[in-house]
Image (cartoon, grey):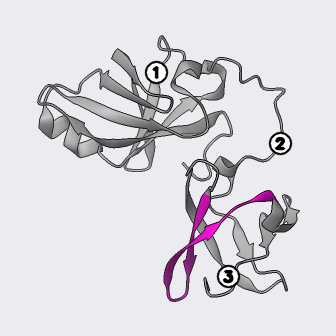
């Protein structure tokens, strides 16, 4: 949802369809399933526009996943169509996340430029993988996509105004 209002937050990704009745397995990212207000719609991008869906059923699976049925999703084909899609919510629809909460989160980094320790451009951050204890960035370079670990110890500098992040990239990754 790049360029969209900061009112939206990418909260999850549709991991796969589940069963034949339109259910989907959703993996949560920056929030836990318990932080989602189930009375508010979630949004999935179609042709560059956020389309709202209400949650008909929600069964939490572990700490970061849920089995979900959305309005309008009635069969396996419907669920397969959105498999792999990011799920967004309005910040105001999330529990415990107030507008006063400021600060840079990993969810804000797609679209930013990654620089190496010496300030040379590595590429553009396209996504991230929230691996517990080892979040990684997907970076589009001139020769393809690479994964780079994101850890506080590796951050050299962050320039929010120019959307630049400078990392001490481990040797051999670039």
Secondary structure at numbered mark 2: loop
Residue 174 in which image quadrant: bottom right
Residue 15 in which image quadrant: top left
The correct choice, above or below, for 28 with respect to 167 in the image is above
Callout 2 touching callout 1 (CB < 8 Å): no
Residue assigned mark 1? 41
> In front: 162, or 144?
144
The correct choice, above or below, for 76 with respect to 129 in the image is above
Residue 156 in which image quadrant: bottom right
Asked whether residue 124 is drawn in magenta, I would say no
The correct choice, above or below, for 61 with respect to 102 in the image is above
Q: Is residue 50 left or right of residue 32?
A: left
Q: Position of residue 57 (x, y in %)?
A: 32, 15
- Residue drawn at (61%, 35%), measured in percent from left and top? 8
Q: What stretch is highlighted in magenta?
A: 136-152
Secondary structure at numbered mark 3: strand
- Residue drawn at (77%, 81%), measured in percent from left and top? 116
Callout 2 touching callout 3 (CB < 8 Å): no
Closer to the N terminus: mark 1 or mark 3? 1
Mark in front: 2 vs 1? 2
The correct choice, above or below, for 79 with respect to 145 in the image is above
Asked whether residue 138 is drawn in magenta, I would say yes
Q: Distance between the residues labelled 2 and 1?
A: 25 Å
Residue assigned mark 3? 122
Residue assigned mark 2? 103
Closer to the N terminus: mark 2 or mark 3? 2
Q: Distance between the residues labelled 2 and 3?
A: 24 Å
> In front: 129, or 93?
129
């Amino acid at each position: 949802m790049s360029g969209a209002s900061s009112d939206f937050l990418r909260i999850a990704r549709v991991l796969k369809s589940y069963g034949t009745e339109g259910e989907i397995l959703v993996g949560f990212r920056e929030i836990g399933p318990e932080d989602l207000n189930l009375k508010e719609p979630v949004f999935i991008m179609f042709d560059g526009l956020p389309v709202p869906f209400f949650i008909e059923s929600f069964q939490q699976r572990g700490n970061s996943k849920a089995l979900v049925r959305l309005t309008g999703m009635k069969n396996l084909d419907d669920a397969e169509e959105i498999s792999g899609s990011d799920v967004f919510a309005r910040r105001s629809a999330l529990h415990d996340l107030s507008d006063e909460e400021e600060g840079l989160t990993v969810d804000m980094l797609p679209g930013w430029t990654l620089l190496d320790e010496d300030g040379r451009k590595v590429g553009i951050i396209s996504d991230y993988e929230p691996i517990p204890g080892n979040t990684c960035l997907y970076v589009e370079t001139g020769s393809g996509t690479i994964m780079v670990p994101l850890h506080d110890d590796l951050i050299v500098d962050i320039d929010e105004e120019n959307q630049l992040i400078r990392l001490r990239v481990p040797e051999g990754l670039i």
